[in-house]
Amino acid sequence: MRTRPGSEVIDQDRRQLLSTVTMGIAAVGAASLFPAYPAPAATSDEIRPFLVNVPEEALVDLRRRINATRWPDRETVTDESQGVQLATIQEVARYWGADYDWRKCEAKLNALPQFMTEIDGLEIHFIHVRSKHENAMPLIVTHGWPGSVIEQLKIIDPLTNPTAHGASASDAFHLVIPSIPGYGFSARPTTTGWGPDRTARAWVVLMKRLGYTRFVSQGGDLGAVVSHVMAKQEPPELLGIHVNLPATIPPDIAKVLQSGDPPPSDLSADEKRAYEQLKVLFAKRRAYAVMMGTRPQTLTGLADSPVGLAAWLLDHGDGYGQPAAAIVSAVLGRTINGHPADGLTRDDVLDDITLYWLTNTEISSARFYWENKFSVYNAADISLPAAVSVFPGENYQAPRSWTERAYHKLIYFNNVDKGGHYAAWEQPRLFSEEVRAGFRALRKSI
């Protein structure tokens, strides 16, 4: 791995960042803290240390914008059926604009080994933590939307240092957590083509560049899509995948769901439950995804209003069910619709939202939906070894029968007792246990 001395790189990156920010703020306010393409590396495959260093002016501007919000009228209903309620977003804004401290998140990120490298012409940000344990398994974990690498911070130590969490050294991982192109500190693509397929190929390049000739991949939400696509591409270095948003809908069931017809009469109880969950999901809970998948640029206002951005990221069209419940209960600090505020904190959620704001990645992240040509839910049809964990608060509970048909070499399947759509974020201990168990059968292959 060829790198320049760390202190030299970090000082240079800081100077470049501060210079870019100063010019950007002077010209257009705090619209973008990071250029669409950061300064190129000395060589295209160079790996450079990276530190987050947000200027105070950007945080002052953020608070000013929050506190200057022009509020809409209150919703005309007494529930969340029209979207994020006015009182809810005002409570979020009061804390965000006065008491929230981004520097705590910045310190957590900078305490980890972060890097930048150019792949296929695009600068990619990633966290890379190697385990101290011998024969650790290399693992790349991909976040989703509206997530970021912040989603995975709580699983780093349990996966890289399992003996400190009651697990065996033989379950250790070398962990790589990249930011999807257009998300977080990765560059924002300026041309089309950066969807899950190109991203999956880039992740293989990244892992090989880090010296990993055999590795596994994990993902939920869009991260599951990237893992599925990588498995379909079947690079020889990929041993298998683990997903916590499985794609299992059989073709015949997908046709019935699309037509709106009643479910087949021969479905098992688990299959009938999944069918009903999916019926509600597609009818009422996918508006945000349709908008981002068809008209992402129309969401321009999200780049101008932090409160508008927060409302968009908080709402998933499911009221206060999952996955929104986990987020809303955290930001309000109380049980929402039976979902207690015990997995996430208000600062956890605002760390993620603030990252979107500071990096100006609201629109570029939405374009990933526009670029995606792969189904999130229809049967994955994957032949590589696959492990699946089904969390009770996920959008639907995939039946084992469907899962076995979609993943032809299913090496692990488990219904978890607790957790939802943001499993790594909400329940890092349970999630880490699932990842360890899911990949245990592949350990002999590394």
Image (cartoon, helix red, strand yellow):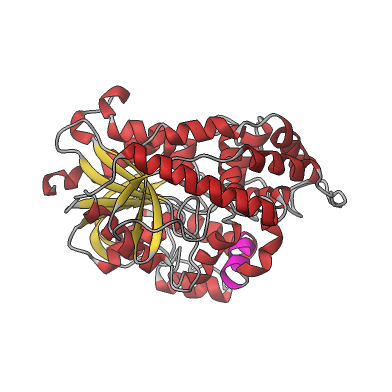
**Across the whole image, how many numbered discs are drawn on residues?**
0
Q: Is residue 396 above or below residue 438?
A: below
Looking at the image, which is closer to me, 80 or 38?
38
Looking at the image, which is closer to me, 45 or 96?
45
| Res 151 visible | yes
| Res 406 visible | no
Q: Main secondary structure of the magenta part?
A: helix
Q: Position of residue 349 (x, y in %)?
A: 59, 39
Residue 130 placement, left or right of 41:
left
Q: Is residue 41 above or below residue 253?
A: above
Looking at the image, which is closer to me, 18 or 179?
18
| Residue at left offset 45%, top offset 63% | 377
Looking at the image, which is closer to me, 48 or 366?
48
Q: Position of residue 215 (x, y in %)?
A: 22, 51
Q: Quadrant of residue 353?
A: top right
| Residue at left offset 69%, top offset 56% | 28
Residue 380 placement, left or right of 446:
right
Residue 185 placement, left or right of 437:
right
Q: Does the magenta segment cover residue 288?
A: yes
Looking at the rendering, the stretch of residues picked out in magenta corresponds to 285-294
Q: Position of residue 287 (x, y in %)?
A: 64, 64
Q: Position of residue 161 (x, y in %)?
A: 28, 29
Q: Quadrant of residue 97?
A: top right
| Residue at left offset 48%, top offset 73% | 191
Q: Does the magenta segment cover residue 425?
A: no
Q: Is residue 17 above or below residue 263?
A: above
